Amino acid sequence: MKPNGRVQLYPMLRLAVFLVAGIVVGEQLYGALSVSVWFVGLVVVSLFAFVVRKYCFWQTAMLFLAFFMLGGCVTVYSLDKVNMTLPEGRVGYSAVVVSQPAETGKTVRCDIIVTDCGRPFKVRAAFFRDERSAKLRPGDGIRAVSVLEKPANYGTSDFDYRRYLLYHGIAATTFLYIDDWHGASVSMDGLTYLERTKIAALRFRDGLLEKFEDLGTGGQEYAILAAMTLGERVDIPDELNDDYSVSGALHVLSLSGLHLSIIYAMLLLLFFRRRHSVVAQSLIVSAVWVYVFIVGLPVSAVRSAVMLTVYSVVTLLNRNSMSLNTLALAALALLVANPLNFYDVGFQLSFMSVMCIVIFYRPLYLLLPQAARDVAPVRWLWQMSAVSVAAQLGAAPLVAFYFGRFSCYFLLTNFIVIPASTVILYGAVFVVLSGWWAWLQLSLVKLLYAVVSLMNTVVSFMASLPGAGIEGIELNLLQLALVYVVIFSVYALSFYARKMRWNRM
């Protein structure tokens, strides 16, 4: 059977669209329709899809409706878990630290999981800063007495902090004074296997971070190195973070497709002659997932790991490995596991960037004449430019919507930070592997810090140039949608214009 239209070439994309529609409707109708209603609807629609299996149109319609119901069902279930009834007043409880503590002013903030107040739930805790709280690490247990409060917004701020916490799985917030808590041995039996594995990985990451800090000189170089290699961003100074944002280089500080692609390519070199074997691809993908666990399972890294896993499988099957179906399958996996990921800014930026790379990279790349593409340095520069522009088409509207900013020199900045990122990631791996030779390890770390320092200098210079960024952009949701409509409409018109020209030739 021939597909009746280009859209039918991307079945996973259509399923993902209906799943997202269900997530949005489920969130909007939360409180009006219970999870049982959505689940019954899912079962009924699935049965209808089986009954009408001989009628392709109706079976397809029921399948789409089933994914719509699935989106609503998992969304309401996830919201029910965080919108729980909390104990009133001061309550005693045991908890485990499950995120890297960050020092902010007179407090130390981190996420903890309360283990003995019914089912385990996550709390955003703020400890009064002292010698004990400054030494807290993931996996440490505490015994505390405090008031557990529902997440709430700050004063007159426009930022919906309550929604942000709830949609990141935070069921409560609390403040702990010096006398409100003490360290204790806490059983992790109530935690899921995934949570316990994540804690163990974060503790291992802490050891690597301490190694980098001991070998280097600390400061801004260490902060950027920690962010780029192990996803630890709490030590980056606000001014430097703003420079990376204004210059359009902030993406290199968030573990994403760029970082995992570099690691994947690095591992392929180890299996150069057997890169297409099942054993080699299995080992490479396993190593990528181990790295994703070590850095704390950030959404962007998980998305990239899922895509690389699919890429690996379809490569072995000799299929088109980089397509909208691959991206949509990654979205399906992440959103079914946690539908609230859809409301995460990083998730949206990550997927829109990759989607636009998949769609726009090749047309942009082919704009360069063949004669120029035959020259290796020109081809390399143009490939980087095409990827950067395509990614910016997906990310820029969202950045303007959420942060009111557009980076004007992103293309120039990427010519520096992407090669530097590659050197830094390769260098970090060699630093870890050279642990048996202290002199070599120390030399590599010094070289690594020099590269990071140079990158910081270039980024700060780019951010200081006149017109580096357009600030104060205000977009509402409708305007954001219209911007994307214009982008994809222009692409569709150019596609059909080229197709008509080819047909006339």
Image: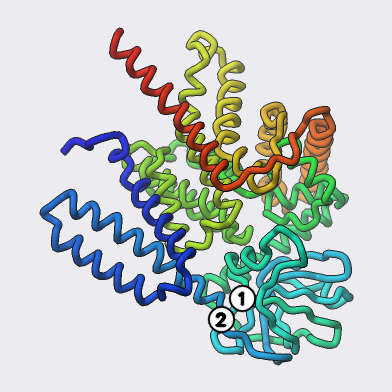
Task: Residue at 84% x, 82% y: name it.
Answer: 177
- Separation (CA) of disc 1 from disc 2: 7 Å
333 left or right, relative to 262: left
202 left or right, relative to 394: right
Q: Secondary structure at mark 1?
A: strand
Based on the displayed image, in which of its 4 quarters is residue 416 positioned?
top right
- Visible residue check, residue 31: yes
174 left or right, relative to 213: left
* For the residues bearing labels 1 and 2, Cβ distance under 8 angstroms: yes
Residue 216 image offset from top left, x and y in percent: 84, 50
Q: Secondary structure at mark 2?
A: loop
Task: Residue at 79% x, 81% y: name it.
Answer: 176
- Residue bearing mark 1: 171
Residues 320 and 185: in front is 320
Work out which quarter of the rendered image holds the N terminus and state it: top left
- Residue bearing mark 2: 84
Question: Which label's residue is closer to the chain start, 1 or 2?
Answer: 2
Residues 13 and 185: in front is 13
Q: Is residue 156 above or below residue 367?
A: below
Q: Is residue 72 above or below residue 369?
A: below
Task: Residue at 62% x, 85% y: name it.
Answer: 86
| Amino acid type at image mark 1 | Ala
Residues 254 and 10: in front is 10
Residue 56 image offset from top left, x and y in percent: 16, 49
Work out which quarter of the rendered image holds the C terminus and state it: top left
